[in-house]
Structures are given as structure tokens and as C-alpha cells.
Amino acid sequence: MTKLQPVLSAHWDEKDSFTIEGYKRHGGYKAVTTALAMEPDAVIQMIKDSGLRGRGGAGFPTGSKWGFIPQGDNKDHYLVVNADESEPGTCKDMPLLLANPHSLIEGIIIGSYAIRANHAFIYLRGEVVHVFRRVQQAIEDAYKAGLLGKNIGGKGFDLELTLHAGAGAYICGEETALLDSLEGFRGQPRLRPPFPAIAGLYAKPTVVNNVESIASVPAIIANGIEWFQSLGTEKSKGFTLYSLSGHVENPGQFEAPLGITLREILELSGGVRKGHHLKFWTPGGSSTPIFTAEHLDVPLDYEGVSAAGSMLGTKALQIFDETTCVVRAALRWSEFYKHESCGKCTPCREGTWWLVQMLHDLEAGKGTEADLEKLLDLCDNIAGRSFCALADGAVAPIISSLKYFRSEYLEHQRNGGCPFDPVASTNFSVVNS
Amino acid sequence: MSATDFTTEQIAIMDKIISRYPRSRSAVMPLLHYVQSIDGFVSPRGIEKIAEILELATAEVTAVSSFYTQYLTKPVGEYHVGVCINTLCAVMGGDAIYDSVSDHLGIGNHETTKDGKVSLERIECNAACDYAPVVMVNWEFYDNQTPQSVNDLVDAARAGNPPAPTRGPNKLRTWKENSAVLAGLDDGLANEGISAGEASLRGLKIAKDSK
Amino acid sequence: MTPELLTEVEMITVVIDGFEVTVPKGTLVIRAAEKLGIQIPRFCDHPLLSPAGACRQCLVDIEINGRAFPKPQASCTIPVENNMIVKTQLSSPVADKAQKGVMELLLINHPLDCPVCDKGGECPLQNQAMSNGRPESRYEGVKRTFDKPVSISSQVLLDRERCVLCARCTRFSDEIAGDPFITLNERGALQQVGIYENDPFESYYSGNTVQICPVGALTGASYRFRSRPFDLISVDSACEHCASGCAMRTDIRRGKTLRRLAGEDALVNEEWNCDKGRWAFKYLAARERVTSPMIRGEDGELHEASWPQAIAAAANGLKGKRAGVLVGGRATLEDAYGYSKFARVALGTNDIDFRSRPHSDEETSFIAGVAAYSTTTYKDIDKADHVVLLGFEPEDESPIVFLRIFKQVKKRGLLVTSDAPYASRGSVKLKAKLVSTISEVSGLTEKSVVILGERLAETTGALSAAVELAEKAGAKIAWIPRRAGERGAIESGAIANLLPGGRPITDIAARVDIQSAWSVSSLPITPGRSTSEILSALALGSDNVSALDAVVIGGVDPMDISNQGLSQLLNTFVVSLEISHSAVTAIADVVLPVAAVVEKSGTFLDWQGSPRAFEKGITEALNRSDVRILSMIAEEIGSPIELPTVAATRREIEALGKWDGAKAEFTKVSLASKSASGDKLTLSSWRQLLDLGTLQAGEANLAGTARTAVAHISANRAASLGVSEGQNVRISSDLGSIILPVAISKMSDESIWVPRNSQGSQVIANLGFVGGQVTVVKA
């Protein structure tokens, strides 16, 4: 008996899983009928009661987010789906949208109905053209089927859905930066308050949800709260997509109840690549402090990962074996954050610039032990000092790697450079040697 | 130069793009994608036209276009090759791929071959880590690449016969054609290609097998 | 915040570093701290800009109701709350470390080129690095470099290496001026301020960005590398360029003005000014100064003379003659008062006028009946439900008035209506509803403000119609002339039908007031004449009973009134009080040098009627104020006016006070109907802010940012003329023509608009009028 629980991914192996016919074949869009027969507030209450929490990283309860939207305020409301998936290691929303875009659209219809939004947006990162095609086709087919547009299902509910392509900016995954971007500005985070629930898109009450969160909604409506709550752990209910990548025999998407451990996923999937062993891994993308083999049994739910000193994040399990230089990994992630820093605030903009230079020197064996103290102090001057959480993410791999692999940093100095063979860590190293 | 030399048809498309949004300014990004699909980059005439029709200052348009990495200040190749060099892909072989293809083509980051066919870019995580190392061509997925496979890919592209993307349409479209898709212009190819790659199906297969 | 508003808001008490302070709800922590004298370092924060929270320099620890924020917060973004406890760098080691950390980060990529930087010595980065930074940087890496400096306009230079990306300049340009021509570009460590390459930073307000830049990233071309702040003497001054009334600061070194900055006045210009006010001060050096009194000799040439000789010559030429007085709209209140009293007492005439621009009898009556008593202020604009602009283009003609209206448009969507003939840039920014005649204006209440510009005098009946419109709704009326001295001139009685203090010339009690104040037994009773009538009378020839034989002219260019103005002066006795040699001094019989604004003390009344007093800036100057010279001539004539100094003049004006008796009646006339005749178009024009104005002489960098002269016509008209955007048309009257490229605008097919006094478009000189029927053809 496996712990895996394919829900969103249950039919991805069907040739036409992304079509409206393929989706309807397995009960797709029935949840819309159910939801439209309910009062909007009852839908919100149901999602609240289900315990669904945001799957984009922060884990905020989805139903509560919906409940923050002021009702009867005579203002336009908006639902915006964050499909900007860009956190390094994160690769769940893109395959989901490629194979099953209608689950998202169905979730959007239900969510919009609940929060009384008549216009919803999908903000899709721009670097995935075929995903764009699939989602756009799905939207068009949903319009044709009367699931979008005027008087949906004859219930008097109107909904427009607009697909919007980003253009390459990690920061637009931050919800207020996303909103500014969607309004046609530079994607830089906004001051909060006001929060999007009060003044979001076009300064109107807005819910911003991750793709997976919204796509999970139809299943909850269709199968009920009890079913959903039977999955997962006490405070982390339901199923989710875990993305396994890196030095493993079989990388890929693993849909399972929250709380599964990496050990279990590795056992199911065939483990770390043959002849090697686990060195470090990220539980939820590069912004979550790294773990090591000692964390194999940490329950991968919001509380479990947090208690062990990291974050569940996007459940992006990036696995690195002993051939990988942790300093190189930290440097490369730092270069990413430097590249993606929006530039608005000083600690992030200047701090990531400096971090990269320090890590470059350390990797080249030019750093001293005193430099490690300076590096940590610099991290302290960046984390918690910046405008948004990007900079907190930027220092996470550095601080955590220093925590577990301090001696490896110093080894670079003793060695006069990186002691690792980069070829050994490639997945074609076997072919080459 | 006056910004009037887009065709009437192109201007009608721009108006249609604007009509998708409750407020016109939101159309800046798709309009920039659209300009790239015509001119191959964010051209001055494109900036001026967008500013004119959205009633913005030209500086406001450049402020936006220069923020996002997909908007380019000079034309790229017909086939724009992005090699993921974020940590995981880099470690898994992305660095080796980049070095190899850069050598092979004799061009560096953000450079284009003399024949205008292929350009190269070091890109960040493209949400396909379970297919590392990943290469994107015109923002289509080329999964599980090696230095040799990418060299072959660019050679074929230069010969006008690029292989199809791993998870994408049956035939690779040009960079300009794909830019039009991002502007929201339907090219009718959504139904081409597979539903999901092997890695995407891994968990599903294991779950089914164990039943 | 003004006291009257203060009483309406809830007050909040917070504890900052152990001290309690009570401030209005909504006050930001950083400003509450200021009230206690606690200076939290900052860069992006600016009290008049929306909070950004970008630089992170002002981090402090905050606790509310016993719950502490887990990390330090930007005090520039957080409003005070009850039960809030704030610990700044003074009492929180965490906040102190956070601030030092941010400062270190701000400096890693800063070039530290303070010794060659204009900002050195008055630089918030330099100062706060000393007060809130680490003694030494730990940065050993490579600094970011950029090409520098970059000209982002002919007037403003950008050094991106020095920039700390606080976004004050970009926020100002967007939020305050509505000119988002500079923006933040690129991102991350490469984020930088910039323009779109083909469109320079040509905002009328660009200089403010230089002033509020907290580092030396933005500098003005005219001051660059000129001086060190500690070598400058700063004096408070008032702007002489328009009636907006900006408080200014003038920085002087060794008797020379090196730069001017916007001063602070919350009720007027807040902390802003326009580029003309900031940078147009080289006019003194641009033309040859009159340095000594001069008398025209038998040889027809001007010769230097002593003051007593020149005063005597002037007095001899004026005494017993039929003489008039023309005083330009740029005189100070005190000088205008001097001219007014001189005309009445020394020359015994009411032939005095300050209007060196097109004017009408209707306007004369309007001035005495309405404008002289207007109490409308900026605050009324702040509170208005509707602002109507008639014959008035605020961005060009009173730029701070524009900023105030724009602020309310931006803040609360204030409704604006304008009679501009085309959608001017200012109208677009104000989202103004355009009307073609006054009768189309609707939606006025007693909370509305109707602003009348001096150009309404150019259309018969327009002032009457405008006043009637406002009166009907009970709306407030503001009359906003272009020049800085006009309101003061009115209140000084430098116009035929008014005595000082707004006293109607025909009112017996008013006359008695003035007679006793001036200790004279009588005042002239013959009705006085306007500028154009005075000029005509000067050309009549001495045999004519209505003729004038002599004229005293102070700072007037007759060509501003008509292209024949100068020729009318040729055969009369002219006493010219002037700063620099001009067309008038070239024909004057006696030339008397006077002090420029910066060399004297004085007062301007802004359009609200509020005094903007200033003291002498350049103390080395020996030049005399007009009033003092007039006093000497009057003495010599034998009818003294007893105004030996500006101070004495101020005392006399103050003692006299304002008129509280019956006002003069504004005699309304009916509106002339517009009639386009045949193929002709109706020309209208106004002066753009930056143009060929005399006071802008000598500042090429400023002139470089002026808007290019174009003729606005409708698309239909362009089609019928066979021209497209940018192609030239010839605009002709009976007297001459101008050739301009066209700009196609939404406007009447029968209208054409051109700038009044710009390069290539000097309407009075070229066409002989400021508005009327013209022939337009493709050129």
C-alpha cells in the first residue's frame, strides 16, 4: 500500500488529460454545479473548514484569505492566480497546468463565485510558452462550454478570465509585486497595509492564490471536507504535490498527503542515485534553509518542517549527493537572488551584490575564517531588514549551509580552491567516465 | 521617428489586447510581447507606440520593459537558447552544457551567431527541475539535456531543422512566433505534444503500480 | 498640518525612546520622533511624497500593546498607534545595528567622491554616514560603475554611481509634477534612474529633483562645480517670476547669485518651485547693466552723469508737464506704491498703469471692482469641489497653482474645467473638461473656485461673463495674473481708478484718507488712462489737448503691449528707471539705474494678496530701489513724496491699511460673439513658462528644456490644409507671419493655437496682435 495519493495528477497519463473532454470524463466541472448551488459564504466556509492552506509557500489558510474580502462593499473584487512559479527547485504548477489546466479553471470559477469576483486573472510566468497555450485553450473551451462568461450555469453568475504572461521576474511571485506587474508597472512589492484583500488589483479587494491551492478546491467540493481532512496531518490537511529533483534515481512529481517524509518518497521512488548518498536537500525551494540526511524523517508538513528549522515552502525537494559542493550551491543561489532582486530596497539590492562577491572569493579559496563571521554578520544585516521576503530567502541557503558544512567552506581555503570535481555531480558523469 | 508605422491590422490587435483588461495600463506587458513578435525586440517604435496608445510617458514603458528579463533591447536569434544555470541544473550538468554550447557556437551570454539563427542566454530556474539539466529554446522545454544533445540541437536549428521540444508542439516555432503566443495570440498548437513527461508521471505510475 | 485641521483629528500618544509624544492620528513614526527632536536617519522618506520604505535606513524597533514586531520596521511607513512603544537607534541596539548595517550597504557601491561632489558639505548621505554609520567599511569587493555623468536634460545631470535609489526624484516627477519622464529602470543591483533615450527630462519642475536628491546623483548644470555650500551665504527671498508667490532661498557668494532653491511655505509652494524660478536668475548678467545715471546730451547720445545731475534733469523734464507713469508688472509693492504716489503727488495725474500686457477698460473696472478685493487662497483650491480655469493655463502661467490643483486631482479626483482651446499638457494632467465658451461651464457650487487669468481681458465681455458665472453659483473668484508685481501694483494704486489699499479714486472718503496720509490738500480728479491710452497720448503731439508730453517708465517693454509701443515714445520726454540697457533706455532722455530684486528689499503680493517680503541679498550692491529714486525726483520737482527708503515705504503702506468702505462697481459688458470669417482661423496664444521672456535671458541650459514651439490645429484642419504632424504652416496677419510645425490636437476646426513668445513664434512682434483672425496655409 503506497502513501501516494494522486488527485490533481490522477489522469495526467491520459493523452487528452488537458482537454475539457478529458477533464469532464473524470467528473470535471461537477464541483462548479455543486458550488453554484450553494451560497457563496457557504463555499468560503467549506474551504475554511477543510483546512486547505496555501500551496505557494507561505501556507496561509485559503478559506480565511477568501473570508477577508469585504462583502456588500459595491466594489469590484478580483481573484488572481499566482502561476509565476519561479522558486528554484519548484516545478509542480507547470506540469499541472500542462496536463490538467481545467482543474485550475474550475477552482477559479468556484473561488470567484465565493468571493463575488466577476473578473479573474491567471498570472503565468512568461518563460513557458506551451503551458500558456494549454491554459489559453482551456479558457477558450471553458467559455465555449458556458463555464465562463455571462450567466454561468444559468445561475446568474458572470465571470471573465484573463490569462496574463509574465516576462521573467522571480519577484512577481510575491503577491503585491505580482499585482503591480499585472497593473502594468515594474514588479516591485507594495507597502502593506493595505493588504490585497482590502486594496489589491486596481486598489480593489483581491485574493491572490497559488495555482495548486485553487486547483485543489474542486476536489474538496466534490469529495467533501471529511475526505480532505482524512488526508494529511493535524494542522496540515489534504494532499499536495511534492517535486523531487536532483541526484535521485527517479525525479518527478509525487502527490501525497501532507506529512510524508523524504525517506518515504525516496524509498518509493528508488532513492538517491546509485552509488551515492544524500548530502543536503531543500524542503521547499532554495529560499528554505537546507536540510541534511539527519532530516530524512521530518514530516513534510507546515509544522514539521518549521519545527526542524526550515519551511515547507513549495515542497520542492532538491536532492544533492556527496559530489556536490555546498559552497558552489550557495554561490549559485546567491547569484540567482542577486539577479532577481527587484532593486527597491537597500539590504536586498546591495546585500545580494556583496554576498555574491564574498561567496565567489570563498569558493575560489580566497576566504578566511574571519570572512565567515563577516558573511554571517552581513546575512544578519540583510535578513529581516529588507522590504519583502526575497532577501530572507537569499540568506537562507548561506546561513543553513554554514550551519551544517562550515568546515567545507574552510576546506576551500586550505585547498586553494574548490575541492570538488564538478563533472562528478553531473547526471551524465557516468556516460563521460 | 514617428510611431505610426505599425500596420492598421497590428494596431487593431493592440487594441484587442488592451480590451482584455479593466484598465488599459495592464496591457503593457502583453503589448511588449507583441512588439517583440513583430520587431524581434522591444524596439523604440514599439515603446513609442505603446506609450501613445496607453497614454503613458515613454519613460514609463521603458521602466517596465527593462525590469523583465524576457524583454530584450536588441534582437536575438531565430532560436533563442536558454541554458538553466541555477544551482540544481548547473550541478546536474547545466554549467557543462553552457560552456560546451558557448564554445561550439563561439558566442557568449546574450550573444547571437553571425547568421542570426541562434542566440544564447544563461537562464534561471524554469520550473522543470525534475528534468534537469533543462534547456529552453524559444521558451519551449528541452528536458534532460547533455552537452552533446544541445550542440546537436543548435546545429539542427542553424540548419533550419530543430528537433521538437520535449513537452511542446510538434515543431519548434521561431522566437518571434512564440512571442506572439505570449501576447495572447492563439497559434492553434495547444493540443500538440504530450500531456505530461515521464518525470511528471512518476508518482502516478508508482501509485498505480502498487495498487 | 494647519491648526484648524488639527482640531478635527484624533490624537495619539506614543512613547519613543522613553518619551511620550502626542500627535495626530496618521502621523508616521519617523515624524512623531522629529517632534521629540529625535532624528532617525533616512533617505527615501520625504514628507510630501508617498512613503516608499525603500532605503531601509530608518529601521526602528516597535511594540504595540506589548507585542513586539519580530524585526525592525521602517519608521517612515508606519503610522503611530495607541500603546505603541518605539525604540530608535538611541535605545535599541538592534535598531542601531540595523541602521549601521544599511548604511554600510548603501556605501559599498557609492564612489565616495565627496571632495569633487557638488553635494559635499550639504549631503544627507555624508552627514548620516558620519552620525549613523560604521567608522570603516568592511567591503573589499568591486564597486558598481556606470558612465557618468549623463545629461538627462540640458539642465539636469545624473550620476548613477552616487545614487542610493531612494526614488525621491521619480516619485516627485510622477506624484507631484505629473511628469513621469524619469523612472527607475532595470532591476536589482543594476536598477538605475533614467529617461527614455529619445525623450529628455523636460518637466517644468525638474529642478526640484535636484534639490531633494539626498546625494549628489542629480545636479543642475548651472551650479555644477561652481561652489561649496560653506562658501555660500543663504538669504530667504521671494520669486520675482510669477504671481504664484514661491518662497525661495538665494545662495550668494561674493556678491553674485550662484543658485536659487525652493523655500518652504506650507500655505503656498510647500517645498517646490518651477525651473524658471530656480534657474532663471542670470538675466542680470545677460544684458549690459545700467551702472550709472545717464542723461541724453545735445549729441543725441547718453552720457554718464552724477545722481544730482540726473535727478535734476528728470525733474526739469517732468515738472509742469503733462506726464504719465508706466510701471511694469514686476515692481515690488513698495516700488509700485512709490510710482502711484509719485504720479498723484509729483505729477498730479491719474495717468498711471501697471499693465504691460494687453488690457481693456472692462479689465480696469474689473480690477477695481473685483480683483483688488479677492480673498481666495490656495486653501480654497485645496477644498474646492470644482476648479474652473478661464483664460488661464496654470502650468505655463502660474506653475505652483498648477501643482496645487494637480495635487487635489490626484488625491481626490478634483473636477477641473478649462477653456483652453486644445488639450494642453496641463489640461491633460488635470483631466480637465474642455469648454469652448464660458457659457458651457456647468456644475458650480459655493465650494467651487473660478480662476480668471489676465488673458480674459483680451476678449470683450469675458471677464464679465466669468464673474457672472461665479456670482450666480456663489463660487469663489480668483484672478491670477502672470507677473509677480501685479497684485501689489493694484493694492498700491498703480492704476488709474484706484488709490492705495484698494481705495476707489472716485470715493470721497477714500480720497480724504489718502490726502491726510500723504499730507496733501488735493488729489488729481481727472480720470486716468490705461497703458495703451497713455502710449497713444504720448504720440498725439503737444498741440493736442489730450496729449501727454512726458512719461516715467519703470521696467516696461512697450513691445509687450503692441508692436507699435516703442515708436509712440519717440517724441516725448522719457525718464527710464531700469536695471539693464533696453529698447526704452535707448530712446530715454534720462536713465536711472535701479536695483534688481536680489539687490534690494521689497515685497511681492502673490495672487492671494499675501505679502512675500524679502530682504536685500547682495549687500555689496549700491543700487537703489525705484521708490527711493522717485522720492528724490519728487523732492526736486518740489512735491515731495517722502519715501526715502523701502522701510519707510512699508511703514506708510501699513499705516494706511486696506480700504473697508464701499467698493467700486464692476461695470460688466456683454460677451463678444466669436465669429470665424471665411477661410480664416481664430488664433489664440499664451506664453509658455519657458520662452523668450526677458528674465530668462542668459540661461541656455534652462532654455534647452523649453517646449518646442508648435501650432496646434485640428485633424480636420490639418487634412484640409494638406499637412501632417510636424509639417510647417504659415500663419499670417496683415502685418506679418510666422512659420511653425503643426501638432494635431483635439480642438475646433476653426481655431489655431501658437505660443505667444517662443523661439520662432513671437506673436505680438510678428502678427501685431495676440489673438484674432489669421490666414493659415501649408508652408
Image (cartoon, rainbow, N blue to C red):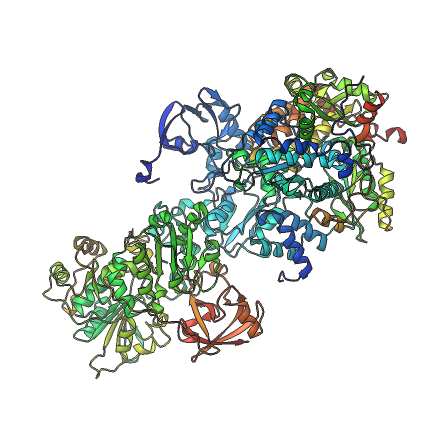
Apparent side of residue C752 relative to residue C548 in the rendered image (left or right)? right
Name the outermost residue toward the left.
Answer: C521
Q: Residue at x 45, y 27 (%)?
A: C88
Q: Nearer the viewer, residue C513 or C289?
A: C513
Q: Residue at x 43, y 67 (%)?
A: C685
The N terminus of chain A, quarter of image: top right
Image position, residue B188 (x, y; %): 77, 48
Q: How many marks?
A: 0
Image position, residue C308 (x, y; %): 21, 67
Q: Quadrant of residue A206?
A: top right
Q: Quadrant of residue A220?
A: top right
Q: Relative to C40, is C432 above or below?
A: below
Apparent side of residue C334 relative to residue A384 in the rendered image (left or right)? left
Apparent side of residue B74 relative to residue C74 in the rendered image (left or right)? right
Q: Nearer the viewer, residue A233 or C114?
A: A233
Apparent side of residue A241 relative to residue C31 in the rendered image (left or right)? right
Q: Nearer the viewer, residue A419 or C449?
A: C449
The C terminus of chain A, quarter of image: top right
Image position, residue A382 (x, y; %): 58, 29
Q: Relative to B17, is A266 above or below?
A: above
Whether residue C75 appears in this view of the structure is: yes
Q: Residue at x 30, y 77 (%)?
A: C569
Image position, residue C635 (x, y; %): 16, 66
Name the outermost residue toward the bottom.
Answer: C543
Whether residue C592 appears in this view of the structure is: no
Q: Relative to B43, is C638 above or below?
A: below
Q: Quadrant of residue A175?
A: top right
